Amino acid sequence: MFKFNSRFVFSLLFPLLIINDSALAQLSDTAIWTSTVQLDYKSTSNITYLKANNVQLKLDVYAPRNAEEPVPTLIYFHGGGWIGGAKENRVLHLLPYLEMGWAVVNVQYRLANISPAPAAVEDCLCALRWVIRNADQYSFDPNKLVVSGDSAGGHLALTTGMLPASAGLDRQCPGKEELKVAAIVNWYGITDVGDLLEGENIKSYAVQWMESTTDRMKIAERVSPLNYVRSDLPPIITIHGDADTLVPYSHAVQLHQALERAKVPNELITVPGGGHGGFTRNEMVDIYDTIQKFLNIHLDIGKN
């Protein structure tokens, strides 16, 4: 398994199709890894995992070509306030996990213009079920699945990893599989949706996702991670800037405090003065190092 190289995350990486020995000698470790990764991984794009509202929802799989045993797998949900964004815009977020030798699944879900809440939550649970059902084909380790995402994607990672079957939000794709993950990596995700629908923290993207339904606060409660904190949750690590103006930092603090009370293994990485992402290079180096240590401990991996 690869050892995480912090420099790698911050390089603009492009496949190098033809490289001779003399060129390799002049490349950094990061560039050499980039030039050979296409030989180690098979990329399969736009696999349909669900059809809803007459829309075929897609995901991309990056899987090791010659894995001798199942590998840890990241499932990533893009941000965009549930109203925008695309999985293709988050490819660079996946690279650190590929360098560690993981498989990665990059997920599309229904946005508000297709279907309002709770559609996106339903879709992401179905994506998790697809990963579990197809674990053998792509060498996913079903016991080491990690969900992650940024902003609205962080919220969806939290709901995917925290919602119990009793929430009834997996009915778009019924099955007998237990929808269980090993850890959650939450990048400044929303934890209290109702907080964004009215009052001082009101956000237009949240209002648009909920539309003007009479029961929107009930739906907001149903899809708010804070309402599902309990002792049997997987380990959760949250990254959030304390000057974020799009998702209040208080969401991260409240989640952290609730997880502490429930004795759920968790960590809150606070970026002082940090906004809604856009952290500095040094901050990102430290964040990814901390994430890897957190996952190594709680998933018992990466010790080689």
Image: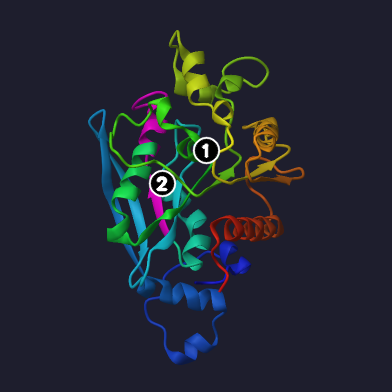
- Residue under numbered circle 2: 87
Q: Residue at x 58, y 33 (%)?
A: 230
Image quarter for residue 57? top left
Against 273, residue 16 (above or below) is below
Query: Can you give x and y, in whole percent of width and height, for residue 211 in the image?
Result: 44, 17
The 10 Å Cα crowd at callout 1, few under 14, some 14 to 19, many 20 or more, is many
Q: Residue at x 70, y 34 (%)?
A: 257
Q: Is residue 112 visible?
A: no
Residue nearest the viewer, comparing 139 with 32: 139
Q: Is residue 100 visible?
A: yes
| Mark 1 vs mark 2: in front | 1
- Choose the circle earlier in sequence order: 1 or 2: 2
Residue 158's disc number: 1
Identify the amino acid type marked 1.
Answer: Leu
Tell me whether the residue at label 1 lies in contact with that at label 2, contact meaning CB atoms closer than 8 angstroms. no
User: Where are the magenta residues, as a range?
Assistant: 103-124
